[in-house]
Image (tube, rainbow, N blue to C red):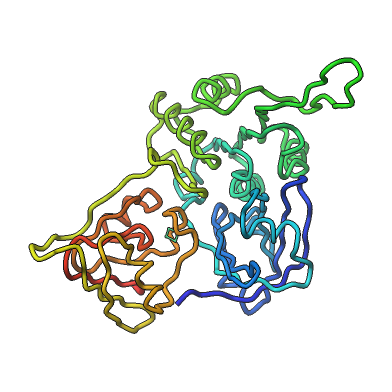
Amino acid sequence: MADFHSLQVSRIDRLTDQAVKVTLDIPNELADNFSFLPGQYITLDVAVGEEKVRRSYSLCSAPSIQGSISVGVKEIPNGQVSPVLNRQIKVGDSIECMPPMGNFTWTKEAQGSAHVVLIGGGSGITPLLSIATTILESNESSKVSLMYGNKNGDSIMFLEDIQAFEQQYPSRFEVIHVFDQPRKKKGLFSSKTMENIAHKEGLISKSLLLGMLNSMNIPVEAAHFYICGPSPMMRSCQQALKSIEVVDERIHVEFFTEKSDEDKAAALLGDADEAFEGKAMVQIQLDGNSQSIEVEERDTVLNAALDNGIDAPYACMVGACTTCKAKLVKGQIEMDDQTALLPKEVEEGYILTCQSHPKSSYIEVDYDA
Ligand code: FES
C-alpha cells in the first residue's frame, strides 16, 4: 500500500519569483521512516481543487538536519501541484508525504572519490544541494565543483546557500554559473541591471562542459559526476563525459521530468508464452494480498491495477521515480523505459509497473518483494 504520512508545513522560503523552499516537520515517531540519503526524493499527495495529485520532489536539505526535511519547488506554468506549493500552501498546513526514495545518491563508491562534480540546470539543483552539503560537512578530503545553468541571475535557486559554500569552503568548493539569457542593459536609459554574478554565457552543452572541466582542472579520470536538469542538458553532459572516457559507474543522472524518446530505453523481461493474444491475466501481490486482474497489451500493469481499485504505489507515472517498482515473478512484460532502474535491479527481475505492458498470457508481479 502507498505509505503516506501527514506532515505539517513548518516554513516556506521564497527562493526566486518562481520557486520556494517548503520545509516539513518530521515528528520523532516518524524519524526512521523519513531518514534519507542525500539526493533522494519524496512524493507528495496534494489537493488540487477537488482532486489529489501526486508529485515527486528531490530533497534539498541534508540528512544531517534533524526534525525536518525540505524540498525546492519551481513553479511550472500551467502545472498542477507546483503552483499550489508556490502560491497557496501556508505554514501549519498538512501535506500527505511518502518517505524518501531514489537511486540518485552519494554512493559508497563516490564517497571514496576525492572530487565530485555536480552539474545542474534550473530546479535540478535541489538533490545536488543536499549532496554538496553532505560532502562538504562530512568528508574533509573531498572537493565539490558545481556547474549550474539558469536563465539569468534572477532564476538561481539557493543562491545564498551556494555563496555560503564559497565562503565557508574556499579550497573545497567552486561554482561556475552558466546563463543562457543573461540580463543586459539595452541602451543608455534602460532600467535593466547587468548581471553582477560571474558567469559563462550559453547552455550547458558538450563543448561548454568539456571547456569547464578543463578550466577547473578537474581530475576527470577519478571524479564522480552527478547530473540533474532538463533532458537535453543531461544528454549532452552524458555524451561529453563518455567522449572523455568517464565510465558509466561514475556518471549519475536523475530524470525528473518527462523524458524525450531518445532518453528512454525499452526492455523486454521474462519468458514469453505461445498463447498471448494481446491480453494477460496478471496476479498482483501487494501487502500480503493477492489479486488477479486482466491487463490489455496497450495498458500498463500499474494503470490496470489502479483501475481495479488496487492501492499500488506510484508517483511520477513517467518512469523516473521508481516508486512503482515491483518484481516480475512469472511471465513476460515489455517496459517502455527502464533507465531509472539500476542494472542490478533489472537483472534481479524488478520492473517499473507504470512502464510495463504484458507480453505473455499469464504474469505474476510482486510489490512486496
Ligand atoms: S511511478 Fe514513477 S517510475 Fe513508475
In the image, what residue occupies the spot 75% across and 63% down?
Answer: 88
Residue at (35, 57) in percent of width and height? 355
- Closest to the observer, 325 or 130: 325
Percent x, y of residue 117: 55, 35
Pick whichever, 245 or 237, lies toward us. 237
Looking at the picture, does residue 214 appear above or below residue 51? Answer: above
| Residue visible at 73% across and 56% down in the picture | 86
**Hey, which quadrant is residue 33 in on the image?**
bottom right
Q: Is residue 150 left or right of residue 365?
A: right
Q: Which image quarter has ligand 1?
A: bottom left
Q: Is 115 on the left or on the right of 338, as rendered?
A: right
Coordinates of residue 235 in the picture (x, y in percent): 45, 34
Give the side of residue 182 with respect to residue 81, left or right. Answer: right
Q: Residue 169, position in %: x, y?
A: 72, 38
* Residue 202 position (above or below residue 96): above
On-image quarter of the N terminus = bottom left
